Structure formats: structure tokens, C-alpha cells
Image (spheres, helix red, strand yellow):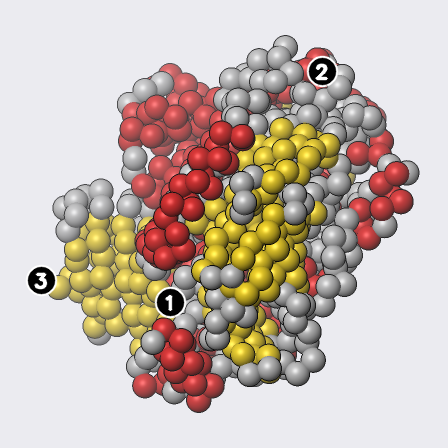
């Protein structure tokens, strides 16, 4: 019965009959199988590179050596385990990750002191640098900063042994050989279903319909793969595992139907365990000690789980090399796989589906004619879109794909999404596949609260907590400041220090900590969880604000400015980069608001307010642009990817067309100069900024550019190489087009483009803990249904109409737009 139903749905999709009020499924698919050309393409495709200690370096490879993995694999994840389904006919290839498998840290051969004692004691030089600025000696100020505000820690493993910063690394690959060939196959379809978080591979061979279904369960913490066919005894499979090649370990049989791999990474002795088990209906299983051979089975289910000995630590002991060791992966993996085997496939899937859809189904987006749908491979869909054909279903799909990726890569109980979320296919990767703190990590979480996934923010909050104690040492060493901060790159071992490079255009980023801390207030502002703010959030915000005010230069004229400072990845060392001032404004405003909520620290709050009043203001330059630096030296022909000086517009809230129209106009000039192209994540940021300018048509243009020029065939964002932040930025940007709440009110459809004349969105969240369902027709708001979860006053704005009304906790309200007015309906 199920098989017939699947065939029927496929027929409906091919006929394109979804225009009758039936919403099409959210999925994308490929119609051609992948090859096995990428089989274990480690070390950048050349193992000899590793022997020479020259693996992939930061940013060296714009093209992943495993092209099919990057552009055609299907990503699955549960926040801890990640896998990519390649879907070749001859052998399924699965790349496998566990988010805590990292090289580096304090447990390398040279010990804890070697890892932690890397901050330069440079704070004493701040007076000399500031004096140089005062005397107009830019060269001296820049030289002192470049030579003293770095560290000795290299960013590439070939530069030191042992490599202390480390990198995220693969947990290996699995191969399931089928004994089939591609000759004579038909009906091939490799699909990722966003509705169910499943990858499905199906095809017909010699009159037999084969199907593979894979998902990763968050409740059970296992990768589950079922192989079936419409005829009995057709599963003749050979299962094998290729481990991470920079590990020392052994693969051993476990019972008649299992394998277990126990290993340590070579660099830091991190222990990890991978457990594999096979369940069959009919047929036979033979365990050869390094492979599982299945013959004549009707159905085969593979269960895989993994863990490391890593334990997150908010209070690391700087003298203990094993301060991040505390989990027994032998025990955890045995428990998970035994429990999964007891449940069986159907129970595992039902629990997975219930858990996943409880998050994913909170938000529904229906754009103009998105139900006028014709099923086609994603390669064809993207090609048509790039040629200028409208595809509202694709836009809707891409939006929800960002939410899917966040659920898959960031769940409570583990680390946040990294530069590639949770997916990696190599021993090492571009930018170490790390936590990049100058936009990338922050962008990963822009859509979390607004798209009703506040739970997915919790790993980021925990990660920020790991930075505080080490970040206090960094703040004191470099700036003589209270509080904590972080620098350009982070790892899972509390790393907060700058790297060794003297290129301060990217390596000097003391505002990384305060920027991260603004996400703490954002989480509170959306959830209004006072208990969280009191017990966890406020101290993170307060100590970050204290760092910010101590870092500033209190000049003789009474003003405060950021000296030295930079505009990340762009331009010189400056005595007042706009980006830094914007972040300082944001964190101080957050700290002030948080102290008011909790009714604490009135004295400190007054000091923060005084610093804000005397902080050097935003400046408009000779081209009408918002100036990026303290001097008016912006180049209107510069199309650099970073637009850091517009931080106050987005993600901050100190610039707005409503409250600061002149500054908003100056931001528009900057965006016009920078252009509408760039790397994927940069287009994602610009999309958000155009939305904040309330220019829906220009925001829509950036969204289209992101899809056309910054997106791979499997919808992953392309820097290049693959970098996941653009996906999250794109989803956040679409949300900003439909709903904004950062200025103290809920702004409905602030940047609705002409292209989306009719539509609806349900389940979006606004600050103040409101949930909203919004629908519009002919480019105008029709109605909005609001649920107030905190019982705070609601301020709505649409165009020039404003409505203010009191709410009760848990109550719902309907507002309609009629004759230019917002009207609260009685219910």
C-alpha cells in the first residue's frame, strides 16, 4: 500500500497538479546518479601533501577536490552527527561527521601550557599607539598594532608540530556496495525531503524497483539507512568503513551483525568510537571482521552512531591537558545503538519524524503562485531560474532549506553550527572549518529566533560560555580590560587569542566577543525568558559591555573612540572604525536594557549611558556614504565583500529609515557602491541590509543573485568553496522582508517585493515573544493573527499605520488592514 502511494504522489508531481490548493512537498532531487570518483578524496586529493605537512590551507582551495560531494550530495544531520548521501548505483557512499571530532587543543604533545600561554602582553602599547594617532603617525600606529596584537599561533597545521589551534575533521566514510551497475537503470531519483528530513534514493534495474531511505534521529542519535525493493531477496550488499586516516585505531567485529571502530586522533589523542550494525529481514549476514556481507535479504537496515571523549567546559583548568575530556564514547555509543536496535526501523522513524516536524512545521511560507508547481530535477530548476524564469517554489524551498540546515546542524546538547554546519569531507578544510567570529558564526544564527527555532540558539549560547574564562585572559593581556572577548577564529577548546598573522585587516578583531554577546540579548528579547537572563545571559552581556568600554580610548576632548581598530578584512588600522563603534553601541544598549529588566547595576548602567553619549557618532562622507573609517577615504568603486560599517543597520538597530533617515540614505549609498554581486554569504548580508532599508525590490534582487550565483546544485551556499552562512543569511533576509521587530515595534511586510504580490507566512516570531501569521493580497496586508506568549504590549506598524494594544499571555489576536488603518478585531 505504501509503495503504491509513493508511485501515486510521484505521478501527481510529474503532472504538476498542485495548483488546486494542494501544497507540493518541500524537497529537491537529482535525476542522475553520482560516480565514485570522490571515493575518500582526502588531503586535497593528494595523500603525498600530508606527508609533506602541506594539507589544505585557509582559503587556498576555492574548489573542493571532491566536486560531487560539494554540489550533489544530500546533507543529513541531528546536531551531533552529520552525513552526506551520494547515491551512486554501484555503491552508496556516505561521508560521516561527529561535530566534536577536532584536532588541536590543550591535550597535544606539548601540553596545556603550550596551548594556553599564547596571549601577548601588549596592553602597555595602547598609549603609544594612541599617541601616534594623535601625532598623525599612521605608519607607527599600524606597525605597533601589527607586530604586537597577534600571537604565535599559526592557522595552518604544516607550520607547527603539534598543531595547537586544530581543525574539524572527518569521521570517515561508509560504502555499501550493491552488486548493481548503472547500465540499464531507469527512474533514478535522489531526493532530500525537507518535510521529513530524509534522503531517498530510488531507481529501477532489471524490472526491480530499489529504494534507500536515510535519516539521522535526534532522539536516538543514530544514522538509519534502510535498503528495500519491491521483490524479495534482492539485497546483496557489502558494507565497509574507511576511517579517518590521521587516527590510530582498530576495526573489530561486534556480534554477528556489527562492527566497532575504536580510535584516537594522532594530534591530540582524542578518543572516539564508531559503531555500525545491520538488521535484516530474510537472507544471511556474514561478519568478516572488517566488512558486513548481506546476501538474499528482503530488507536491510543499517544503524550507525559515534561519539568522542570531548566534554564542553565553561570553566577550563588551564593546567590540565584533559580539561575538555569527560565522555566515555565506548559507553555512549553502545547504549545508543543497542536502544536503536531494540526499537527497529519504524519506531525510530516515527520518533525522528515527530521530533523534527515539531520544529520544522512551525513556519509555513506560501509565495505568489508557489502552488503552481511542476516537478523537475533541481539542476533543471536552478538552470531555468538562472536564465530568468520565475520559480516561487524554488524561492520558498530555499527559504525552508535554511531552516532545515539549522535544525540539522544545531540542536541542544552539542556545539553550534561551524563554517560548514556539521558537514565535512576531508582531514582538514578551508579556514579549518572553524568558528569564524567576524561575521560567519553570527550569520549562522540570524534566522534562529525569527523563524521559530529558538532552541537551535542554545548551542551558540553554550559556545559563548566556553569563551568567557579564556577570553578574560585575552582581554587583559591585549587591552588591560575587564570582561572577556574573542578573536577572529575559535575552536571547541576555548581559543580566544588572535592568530600569528600580522595582517591586521583580518586578524585584529577585538569586537568578536561583544558581537557574539549581542546574540545573548537577542535570545532573551525573543523568548522573554527572565530566568535565563538572570542566571546565564546577563553576566555574559555585562562582562562583554565592560570589555567594550575599557577597550575604548577616552580622548582628552571627552569623546570615546576605538583605537586601534579595523573594519574586518578591509582597510587599514584605524583610530575609529565605524564597525567597532556600531558593535559597541549595540552591546551597551543591550547591557542597559538587560540591567533594567533585572533591576540591577544602576551605577554601571549610568556609566554605560555616559559612554554611549560621548561615543564618536556615525559620519557621512563626501559621496553621501556612511563612512567606514574615521577619515573620509572610502572609494566609491570599491566592491569589497564586507559591509561591516553598516552593522548599525543590520544586524544592529541603531540605524533605521524610521529613526535615522539620513544615516539610512548613507547606508543605501554604500550598498549601491558595493554592488549586488559578491560571495554567497556577502549577498546574504546585503539582502538583509536592503530589507532593513525597506527596499523590497532591491532585497529581492539580492535574493535572486544569491540563488543564481551563490548557490550550488544541492542548494548549499558557495563562498566559494561551500560555506553554510549564506544559506542562513538568505533565510534570515527573506524573514526580514516579511517581518521586522528590532526597533521596538513589529513591522509587517516592511520590504515586500512586487514579485510576491500574494502570499502568506505563518509562525514567524517577533521580539517580545509574539508569534504571527501574516497574509497579503495584491501587494497589501490583509490580516495578521498574533499570539502573545509573554503578555507584553503589542505595537504593530504597517506602512504609515500604527496600532498599539495590550495583550494577555497565551491569548491570540486578529488585526486587519482596512482603508489605511490597522484594526483590532474582536474574537
On screen, 330 above or below 185?
Answer: above
Quarter of the image holding residue 708?
bottom right
On screen, 714 above or below 250?
Answer: below
From the viewer's perspective, is the residue at label 1 or at label 3 nearer? 1
Other residues around mark 1 within 10 Å, as few (<14) / some (14–19) / many (≥20): many
Q: Residue at x 68, y 15 (%)?
A: 112
x, y percentage for residue 202? 54, 73
Answer with mark 1 or mark 3, whichever residue precedes in sequence: 1
Residue 522 relative to residue 805: left or right: right
Q: Residue at x 33, y 46 (%)?
A: 767
Q: Which mark is residue 826?
A: 3
Q: Quadrant of the C terminus?
A: bottom left
Q: Return the residue nearer the eye: 512 or 250.
A: 250
Other residues around mark 3 within 10 Å, as few (<14) / some (14–19) / many (≥20): few
Q: Are marks 1 and 3 in contact (CB under 8 Å)?
A: no
Using the rendered image of the protein, determine whether residue 418 is visible from the camera's viewpoint. Answer: no
From the viewer's perspective, is the residue at label 2 or at label 3 nearer? 2
Q: Quadrant of the N terminus?
A: bottom left
Q: Which mark is residue 602?
A: none
Q: Which mark is residue 111?
A: 2
On screen, 681 above or below 758?
Answer: above
User: Which residue is label 1 attached to?
Assistant: 365
Q: Return the residue nearer the eye: 64 or 132.
A: 64
On screen, 693 above or below 171?
Answer: below
Q: Residue at x 85, y 46 (%)?
A: 47
SS for dot 3: loop
x, y percentage for residue 437? 61, 38
Answer with mark 2 or mark 1, whichever residue precedes in sequence: 2
x, y percentage for residue 138? 80, 31
Q: Return the residue nearer the eye: 363 or 509.
A: 363
Distance (Cα) linking label 2 and label 1: 52 Å
Amino acid at each position: 500500500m505504501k509503495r503504491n502511494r509513493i508511485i501515486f504522489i510521484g505521478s501527481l508531481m510529474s503532472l504538476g497538479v498542485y495548483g488546486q490548493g494542494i501544497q507540493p512537498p518541500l524537497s529537491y532531487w537529482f535525476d542522475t546518479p553520482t560516480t565514485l570518483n570522490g571515493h575518500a578524496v582526502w588531503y586535497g586529493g593528494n595523500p603525498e601533501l600530508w606527508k609533506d605537512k602541506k594539507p589544505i590551507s585557509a582559503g587556498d582551495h576555492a574548489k573542493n577536490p571532491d566536486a560531487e560531494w560539494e554540489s550533489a550530495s544530500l546533507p543529513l544531520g541531528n546536531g551531533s552527527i552529520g552525513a552526506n548521501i551520494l547515491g551512486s548505483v554501484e555503491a552508496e557512499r556516505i561521508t560521516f561527521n561527529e561535530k566534536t571530532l577536532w584536532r588541536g587543543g590543550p591535550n597535544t604533545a606539548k601540553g596545556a601550557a603550550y596551548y594556553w600561554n599564547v596571549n601577548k602582553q601588549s596592553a602597555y602599547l595602547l598609549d603609544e599607539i594612541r599617541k601616534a594617532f594623535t601625532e598623525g603617525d599612521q605608519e607607527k600606529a599600524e606597525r605597533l598594532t601589527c607586530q604586537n596584537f597577534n600571537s604565535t599561533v599559526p592557522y595552518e597545521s604544516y607550520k607547527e608540530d603539534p598543531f595547537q589551534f586544530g581543525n574539524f575533521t572527518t569521521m570517515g566514510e561508509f560504502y555499501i556496495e550493491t552488486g548493481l551497475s548503472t547500465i540499464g537503470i531507469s527512474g533514478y531519483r535522489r531526493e532530500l525531503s525537507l518535510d521529513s528530513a530524509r534522503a531517498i534514493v530510488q531507481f529501477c534495474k532489471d524490472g526491480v524497483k530499489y529504494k534507500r531511505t536515510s535519516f539521522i534521529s535526534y532522539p536516538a542519535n543514530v544514522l538509519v539507512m534502510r535498503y528495500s525493493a519491491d521483490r524479495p531477496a534482492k539485497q546483496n550488499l557489502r558494507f565497509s568503513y574507511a576511517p579517518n586516516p590521521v587516527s590510530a585505531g582498530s576495526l573489530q567485529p561486534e556480534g554477528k551483525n556489527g562492527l566497532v571502530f575504536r580510535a584516537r586522533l594522532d594530534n591530540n589523542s582524542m578518543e572516539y568510537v564508531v559503531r555500525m550494525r545491520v538488521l535484516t529481514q530474510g537472507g544471511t549476514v556474514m561478519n568478516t571482521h572488517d566488512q558486513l556481507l548481506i546476501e538474499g535479504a528482503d530488507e536491510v537496515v543499517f544503524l550507525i552512531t559515534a561519539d568522542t571523549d570531548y566534554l564542553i567546559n565553561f570553566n577550563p583548568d588551564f593546567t590540565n591537558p584533559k580539561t575538555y575530556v569527560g565522555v566515555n564514547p565506548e559507553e555512549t555509543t553502545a547504549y545508543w545503538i543497542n536502544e536503536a536496535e531494540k526499537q527497529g526501523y519504524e519506531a525510530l522513524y516515527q520518533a525522528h519524524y515527530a521530533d523534527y516536524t515539531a520544529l520544522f512545521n512551525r513556519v509555513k511560507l506560501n509565495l505568489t503562485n508557489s502552488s503552481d508547481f511542476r516537478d523537475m530535477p533541481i539542476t533543471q530548476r536552478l538552470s531555468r531560474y538562472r536564465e530568468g524564469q520565475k520559480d516561487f517554489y524554488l524561492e520558498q524551498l530555499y527559504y525552508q532549506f535554511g531552516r532545515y540546515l539549522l535544525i540539522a546542524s544545531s540542536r541542544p546538547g552539542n556545539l553550534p553550527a561551524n563554517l560548514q554546519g556539521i558537514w565535512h569531507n576531508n582531514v582538514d578544510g578551508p579556514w579549518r572549518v572553524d568558528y569564524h567570529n567576524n561575521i560567519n558564526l553570527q550569520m549562522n544564527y540570524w534566522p534562529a529566533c525569527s523563524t521559530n527555532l529558538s532552541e537551535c540558539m542554545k548551542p551558540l549560547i553554550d559556545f559563548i560560555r566556553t569563551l568567557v574564562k579564556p577570553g578574560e585572559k585575552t582581554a587583559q593581556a591585549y587591552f588591560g580590560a575587564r570582561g572577556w572577548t574573542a578573536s577572529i577564529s575559535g575552536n571547541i577548546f576555548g581559543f580566544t587569542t588572535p592568530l600569528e598573522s600580522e595582517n591586521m585587516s583580518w586578524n585584529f578583531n577585538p569586537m568578536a566577543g561583544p558581537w557574539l554577546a549581542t546574540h545573548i540579548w537577542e535570545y532573551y528579547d525573543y523568548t522573554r525568558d527572565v530566568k535565563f537572563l538572570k542566571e546565564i545571559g546577563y553576566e555574559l552581556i555585562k562582562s562583554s559591555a565592560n570589555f567594550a568600554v575599557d577597550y575604548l580610548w577616552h580622548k582628552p576632548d571627552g569623546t570615546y573612540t576605538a583605537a586601534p581598530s579595523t573594519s574586518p578584512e578591509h582597510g587599514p588600522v584605524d583610530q575609529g572604525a565605524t564597525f567597532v563603534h556600531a558593535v559597541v553601541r549595540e552591546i551597551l544598549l543591550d547591557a542597559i536594557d538587560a540591567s533594567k529588566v533585572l533591576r540591577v547595576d544602576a551605577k554601571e548602567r549610568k556609566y554605560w549611558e555616559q559612554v554611549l553619549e560621548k561615543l564618536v557618532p556615525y559620519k557621512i562622507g563626501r559621496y553621501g556614504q556612511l563612512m567606514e573609517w574615521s577619515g573620509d577615504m572610502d572609494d566609491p568603486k570599491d566592491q569589497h565583500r564586507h559591509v561591516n560599517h553598516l552593522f548599525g543597520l543590520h544586524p544592529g538597530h541603531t540605524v533605521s529609515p524610521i529613526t535615522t533617515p539620513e544615516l539610512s540614505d548613507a547606508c543605501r549609498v554604500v550598498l549601491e557602491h558595493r554592488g549586488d554581486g559578491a560571495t554567497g554569504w556577502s549577498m546574504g548580508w546585503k539582502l538583509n541590509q536592503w530589507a532593513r532599508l525597506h527596499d523590497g525590490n532591491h532585497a529581492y534582487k539580492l535574493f535572486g543573485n544569491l540563488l543564481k550565483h551563490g548557490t550550488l546544485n544541492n542548494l548549499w551556499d558557495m563562498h566559494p568553496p561551500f560555506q553554510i552562512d549564506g544559506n542562513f543569511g538568505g533565510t534570515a533576509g527573506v524573514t526580514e522582508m516579511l517581518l521586522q521587530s528590532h526597533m521596538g515595534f513589529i513591522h509587517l511586510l516592511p520590504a515586500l517585493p512586487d514579485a510576491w504580490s500574494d502570499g502568506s507566512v505563518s509562525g514567524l516570531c517577533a521580539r517580545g515573544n509574539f508569534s504571527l501569521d501574516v497574509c497579503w493580497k495584491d501587494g497589501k496586508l490583509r490580516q495578521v493573527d498574533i499570539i502573545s506568549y509573554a503578555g507584553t504590549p503589542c505595537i504593530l506598524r504597517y506602512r504609515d499605520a500604527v496600532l498599539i494594544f495590550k495583550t494577555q499571555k497565551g491569548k491570540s489576536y486578529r488585526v486587519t488592514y482596512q482603508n489605511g488603518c490597522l484594526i483590532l478585531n474582536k474574537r
